[in-house]
Image (cartoon, rainbow, N blue to C red):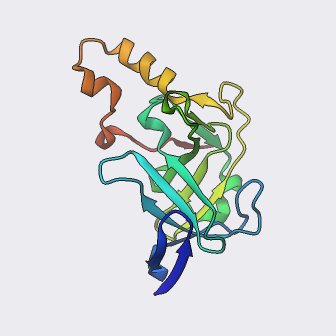
Amino acid sequence: MAKITTTRFGEIEVQESDTLKLPQGLIGFPELNTFVLLDHDKDSPFKWLQSLEDGALAFVLINPLLFYPSYTVEVAEAEVQDLGLVKEEDAVVSVIVTMPTNPENMTANLKAPLIFNLKNRLGKQLILNQTEYSIRHHIMDEMKKTAGATATQAPSETMIPDRTKTASAVSLK
């Protein structure tokens, strides 16, 4: 067990089995390769990807299927071969969220998702060729569209998608 001092969470203890390895790092941070995933809050859809090499760096992540149910990451098997993915279902997709002062304006980077294989704790960030995805996709706008499409549901059901109904967003070609 290692103790890491972080800016946001203070000193945390991390089990080796909880670490995530991103051998190529993240875009703009190729030297950072070891992370841990931390909960934002118990019932929050957000997670923190905390760097174990730089305690000041942590990124907010979300499963894009929670606000954009049709989101699909189409990648050639060769692009994720180094992750050891055998089946699409083994992949977990997250996107980095930018949280401005006003949460209504938060955006997600759908153009460069993170793909994780939680069986071996390996991950990587990809840059997608799909033109419909942007680096600043407005989460609340997308949730309002989803809410409008399902207006017959109760408000709590439309604004907070059921996390148990999400499937893999990865499509291997």
Q: Percent position (x, y) of residue 164?
A: 29, 43
Quarter where residue 6 is shown: bottom right
Residue with the most extreme left position: 154
Residue at 50% of width from left, 83% of height from top? Answer: 3
In the figure, 3 relative to 167: above or below?
below
Which of the image's four quarters has the C terminus?
Answer: top right
- Out of 104 and 159, give the one closest to the viewer: 104
Q: Is residue 23 left or right of residue 8?
A: right
In the figure, 61 relative to 141: above or below?
below
Residue at 45% of width from left, 44% of height from top? Answer: 168
In the figure, 121 relative to 14: above or below?
above
Q: Percent position (x, y) of residue 87?
A: 49, 55
Numbered disc total: 0
Q: Percent position (x, y) of residue 155?
A: 26, 21
Quarter where residue 165 is shown: top left
Residue 87 shows in the view: no
Q: Percent position (x, y) of residue 105?
A: 55, 28
Q: Is residue 156 left or right of residue 125?
A: left
Residue with the most extreme bottom position: 1
- Out of 89 and 115, give the one closest to the viewer: 115
Residue at 49% of width from left, 33% of height from top? Answer: 103
Q: Is residue 93 left or right of residue 66?
A: right
Residue 63 shows in the view: yes
- Out of 96 and 129, give the one closest to the viewer: 96
Residue at 50% of width from left, 21% of height from top? Answer: 141
